[in-house]
Amino acid sequence: MDAAVIVVGAGPAGMMLAGELRLAGVDVIVLERLAERTGESRGLGFTARTMEVFDQRGILPRFGEVETSNQGHFGGLPIDFGVLEGAWQAAKTIPQSVTEQHLEEWATSLGADIRRNHEFLSLTDDGDGVEVEVRGPAGVHTLRAAYLVGCDGGRSSVRKAAGFDFPGTAATLEMFLADLKGVDIKPRMIGETLPGGMVMAGPLPGGITRIIVCERGTPPQRREVPPSFDEVADAWKRLTGDDISHAEPVWVSSFGDATRQVTEYRRGRVLLAGDSAHIHLPAGGQGMNTSIQDSVNLGWKLAAVVRGWAPQGLLDSYHSERHAVGKRLLMNTQAQGLLFLSGAEVQPLRDVLTELIGYKDVSQHLAAMVSGLEITYDVGTGTHPLLGKRMPHLELTGAGRRTSSTELLHSARGVLLDLEDNPRLRARAAGWADRVDTVTAEPRAVSPASGLQGTSAVLVRPDGYIAWAAPGSHHDLPMALERWFGAPRPV
């Protein structure tokens, strides 16, 4: 074996997965066709859930001072995300290129082998491993790994080579995106619906203005090269009446509203994550965030299989958990596209939804949907309100020092929080000490919004989701530990 895992694609999903695997001590090679990062950034910022994920891995300080905001939208209708109590605010105006850079530096610091200018050509899954044919600077050669993961985007070569089904709908429209210098445009941060289409504009660092323009009635094109800036400027003028042809384009791109999802996230020893598994209208910047969270869900499970302690079905749970998330992602982005990009015939629906957003329960529901905070996995039955949900940030004091539930997840291991100094609880978990850190600590404060009031213990998976809690879980602790972390070792 050249590595336990080969990842194809060095975007956010690929870099996040590489880092997750290295935290678990798994050898990983990342193959990237491009010789260097493009510096282009379709995605901007990250959602509240991704902020939490980065904080749980200790990555967030790499970004320095992060500008955040509670202002968001659903299909162009404003929503105050401050209704999500106890959650991070979303990061704004951080270019995807910056996110990719920091994730690559993090993964490399952990020992990931990043091979740029290496193009994936083909694969053979023989049941015991995967042979990968690669074209690199020295020519065509073959690598072998136990598993191959395609993180190579919406036109994924891995997906095609492995024969994944990718049903859905083709694009019905085309949108232009451009970053410009030397132009003064009225900000339209969440977009503006006009008689002929939709336009969006907002400032980025470095004196750059980002615009997005969608002209209704323009058929989509399958382009091999980006559109010219003249096309973008002409469309902008037709919709707004403003002439931006004098601007200096930093880069120009186009995208559509094609909506597709693979029927399975795993075929034998080949798996998909991120845009390789799902494509959609980039409404609310959810694509990159969902891709990163795919990798966080997959990383620890794949590492558990490689290291030999995964229980039966653990790797299959990657599909069952994340396919459902992807399905809802496609649903909400399609809904937002109808609201945002349709004509006057949809205005009554916009008006009704605007009224509904005025109700706190509705705005909370929509904000949680697009920020990734609504996700709940099936971890077993029980009455505890946080079963299967993300672990909220909890400040802790134990063993003479201060820590937090977030800091305890930096190493990407399971965490059993003993909040009532229960020696019997710790004894029952002793057989999993090589995979699960048992921490006895006292919460410094538990807010009513956290869902943790009255909780005596909680088992947190490496991806930050609660697998068991007491009181309130119908499974006992050893059953939950064995379900997610395999059989115990003799103590």
Image (cartoon, rainbow, N blue to C red):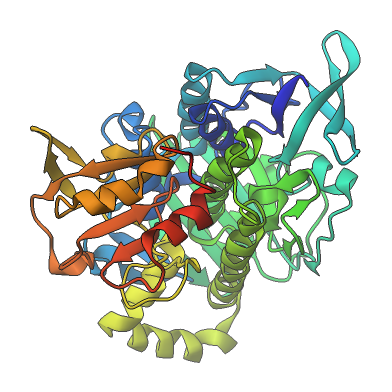
Residue at 68% x, 63% y is: 257
Above or below, 291 relative to 199: above
Residue closest to the eye, 4 or 347: 4
Q: Is residue 450 left or right of residue 264?
A: left
Residue at 29% x, 29% y is: 64
Image quadrant of residue 22? top right
Q: Quadrant of the N terminus?
A: top right
**Can you name the residue that lies furthest to the top here?**
138
Image quadrant of residue 354? bottom left
Above or below, 443 relative to 5: below
Above or below, 482 relative to 75: above
Please state the horizontal and vertical placement of residue 470, each as a whole percent of the image: 27, 65
Residue closest to the eye, 231 or 404: 404
Count up the numbered dots.
0
Q: Quadrant of the C terminus?
A: top left
Does residue 100 appear anywhere in the picture? yes
Please state the horizontal and vertical placement of residue 21, each as a whole percent of the image: 56, 32
Residue closest to the eye, 133 or 249: 133
Please state the horizontal and vertical placement of residue 217, each as a whole percent of the image: 73, 71
Residue at 45% x, 34% y is: 182
Please state the horizontal and vertical placement of residue 443, each as a whole percent of the image: 12, 51
Does residue 184 appear anywhere in the picture? no
